Image (cartoon, helix red, strand yellow):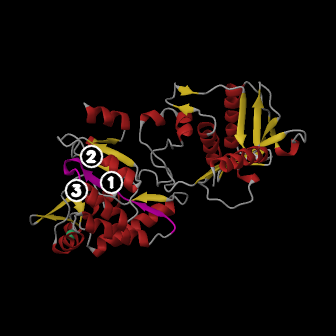
């Protein structure tokens, strides 16, 4: 093909393309021909999503876009529909998305909270808003809010619960919402059964005297530091206890079946054989937790992957084994008082998509604190 011919083709095709290209113009020069539509029976969170969208679109463009329920729709106006009720498709409760259709825009989540998250993602991704801290945000200003007619975004997170244990979110709920992070420490959990639950299921005061064999064998002695995880009675008692907690708290969906922070695990012949086979002391723990979990197929059994900060890269291998075998829901970083500062935990959290739950600066329970990324980084860099 000669250069001349190529140039000719370009000249002909380009104008044709631009003619078919369509835009959704939400606001121009402080005016808008749109309404924010909420369902007639809108949840209070969806109403909040509507007022947040209204407030930010005004801040961005100067246009006042009214919020109305769908039964009072102004036929002269285009609509920004909020909530899942406007979407025919069946989506997961955790899915968020937005889409331009004809001249209308749909912003939706699988439940009211996720509709609120979808509004913030729309403002971030399409309008360039940034939520930097509870006090600092960037909201760009423009004369014209315009979207490509083909705008379509949908996201379903692989992890349903996004918990970051930090005062930053506990004390700033609006900011947490903007980042799509929960501000409850253990959402959906049986109250008080978030971590270190072995003692709760098998109080040593009740069992140790009559059944020392339920506890960890160390150098010929039974210690209450951990449980003997291959003892069938232990499995039965823990399973029964988990069942009675779920009966007492029927709305709870998760319970933790987890150990204390110490390395004094059971070394009886049966436990040691499994640990040898799995290549890690996590072996007996993983099998035990899976056996409990099998009895509760419609609930979640969480446990703790305890990573020793001194281990460095080795802990990654251990973590992979853990994830393959069970539904681990969090990472506890221990021994932060040592010289190894455990930076490895970030690559583990990222690659396995696990949240970091707790951090420990010693080996006792009192040393355990909710993980605060800011504080951790200060320690790591300090
Ligand atoms: Zn044992």
Residue 226, quarter of the rendered image: bottom left
What's the residue at 71%, 27% (across, down)?
A: 61
Residue that label 2 marks: 365
Q: Is residue 280 magenta?
A: no
Residue that label 3 marks: 314
- The image position of residue 109, as x and y in percent, is 65, 50
- Ligand 1 position by quadrant: bottom left
Residue 288, quarter of the rendered image: bottom left
What's the magenta region? 298-314
Q: Are marks 1 and 2 in contact (CB under 8 Å)?
A: yes
Quadrant showing the N terminus:
bottom right
Quadrant showing the C terminus:
top left
Q: Is residue 292 visible?
A: yes
Q: Is residue 82 visible?
A: no
Helix, strand, or loop for circle 2?
Answer: helix
Sequence-wise, the earlier of marks 3 and 2 is 3
């Amino acid at each position: 093909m000669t250069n001349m011919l190529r140039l000719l083709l370009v000249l002909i095709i380009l104008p044709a393309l631009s003619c078919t290209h369509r835009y959704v113009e939400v606001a121009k020069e402080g005016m808008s021909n749109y309404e924010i539509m909420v369902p007639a029976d809108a949840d209070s969170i969806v109403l909040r999503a509507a007022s947040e969208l209204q407030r930010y679109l005004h801040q961005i463009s100067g246009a006042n876009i009214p919020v109305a329920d769908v039964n009072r729709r102004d036929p002269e106006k285009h609509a920004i529909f909020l909530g899942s009720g406007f979407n025919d498709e069946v989506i997961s409760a955790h899915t968020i998305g937005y889409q331009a259709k004809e001249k209308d825009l749909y912003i939706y989540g699988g439940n009211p909270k996720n509709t609120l998250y979808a509004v913030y993602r729309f403002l971030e991704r399409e309008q360039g808003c940034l939520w930097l801290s509870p006090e600092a945000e960037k909201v760009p200003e423009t004369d014209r809010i315009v979207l490509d007619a083909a705008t379509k975004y949908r996201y379903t997170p692989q992890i349903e619960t996004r918990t970051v244990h930090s005062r930053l979110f506990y004390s700033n709920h609006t900011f947490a919402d903007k980042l799509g992070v929960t501000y409850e420490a253990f959402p959906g959990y049986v109250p008080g059964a978030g971590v270190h639950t072995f003692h709760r299921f098998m109080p040593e005061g009740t069992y140790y005297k009559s059944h020392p064999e339920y506890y960890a064998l160390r150098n010929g002695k039974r210690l209450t530091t951990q449980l003997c995880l291959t003892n069938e009675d232990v499995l039965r008692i823990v399973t029964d206890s988990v069942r009675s907690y779920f009966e007492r708290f029927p709305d709870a969906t998760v319970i933790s079946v987890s150990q204390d922070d110490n390395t004094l695990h059971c070394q009886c012949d049966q436990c040691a054989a499994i640990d040898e086979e799995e290549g890690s002391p996590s072996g007996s723990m993983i099998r035990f937790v899976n056996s409990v979990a099998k009895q509760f197929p419609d609930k979640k059994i969480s446990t703790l992957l305890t990573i020793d900060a001194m281990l460095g890269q080795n802990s990654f291998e251990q973590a992979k084994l853990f994830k393959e075998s069970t539904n681990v829901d969090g990472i506890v970083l221990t021994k932060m008082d040592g010289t190894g500062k455990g930076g490895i935990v970030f690559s583990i959290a990222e690659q396995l998509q696990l949240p970091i739950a707790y951090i420990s600066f010693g080996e006792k329970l009192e040393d355990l604190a909710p993980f605060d990324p800011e504080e951790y980084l200060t320690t790591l860099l300090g």
